[in-house]
Image (cartoon, grey):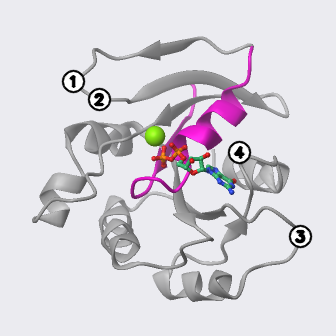
Amino acid sequence: AKPVVAIVGRPNVGKSTFFNRIAGKRISIVEDTPGVTRDRIYADAEWLNHKFTLIDTGGMEPDSKDIILSQMRNQVYMALDTADVILFIVDGRTGLVAQDEEVANILRRTGKPVILVVNKVDNRDLPDSFYDFYQLGMGEPFAISSTNALGLGDLLDEAVANF
Ligand code: GDP
Ligand code: MG
């Protein structure tokens, strides 16, 4: 089976934008039944002759009381379960927030390789907030811009290196 790369993170950090950027046009996208697994989406993707399946997730609810139970719904757990590599997306514009810590704690428990991705770094200058993300204990973050297509090559190099 092809390696699976799962995209996770709190809402609005740019997961789906990243997914669409990587999936590109040659990709077949299958959306699950609306309302059942919300917007989990699979795509076949390829980087430097490495084929893999990319999974977008959207199940981390922003406004629920029990963060652990509600944010990481079944679909996210399923994505984590099948994942060989996890891309943990955070928002370089908002900076580090408590929800990121919650997500980090859950991802740590998977024991799987997690790559920390600071999205919305839209130019070559790293925002001051970038360095706060080291506190997540996920190693060196990769700065990318999904909208401006910056930093994606280095990130994908790292992802396929974990297959
Ligand atoms: P998701 O909830 O994590 O899937 O986030 P979305 O992909 O829906 O994006 C949330 C918002 O962030 C949208 O308005 C996007 O246009 C914006 N966004 C996503 N990636 C970037 C980026 O690299 N730079 C900037 N400036 N905005 C972005
Ligand atoms: Mg989304």
Residue 69, numbered circle: none
Q: Is mark 4 within 8 Å of ligand 1?
A: no
Residue 35, numbered circle: 1
Find disc 4 in the rendering and name its residue: 160
- All told, the count of numbered labels is 4
Residue 124, numbered circle: 3
Range of residues picked out in magenta: 2-25
Q: Secondary structure at mark 1?
A: loop
Pointers 3 and 1 in contact (CB under 8 A)? no
Query: Is 18 colored magenta in this rendering?
Result: yes
The residue under the point 53% across, 65% down is 90
Pointers 1 and 2 in contact (CB under 8 A)? yes
Q: CA distance from mark 1 to mark 4?
A: 32 Å
Q: Tell me which label, 3 or 1, sits earlier in the chain.
A: 1
Find disc 2 in the rendering and name its residue: 38
Question: What residue type is disc 3 on?
Answer: Arg
- Density class for disc 1 (Cα within 10 Å; few <14, some 14-19, many ≥20) is few
Q: CA distance from mark 1 to mark 2?
A: 5 Å
- Density class for disc 3 (Cα within 10 Å; few <14, some 14-19, many ≥20) is few
Mark 3 or 4: in front is 3
- Density class for disc 4 (Cα within 10 Å; few <14, some 14-19, many ≥20) is some
Q: Position of residue 129 (x, y in %)?
A: 63, 84
Question: What residue type is disc 4 on?
Answer: Val
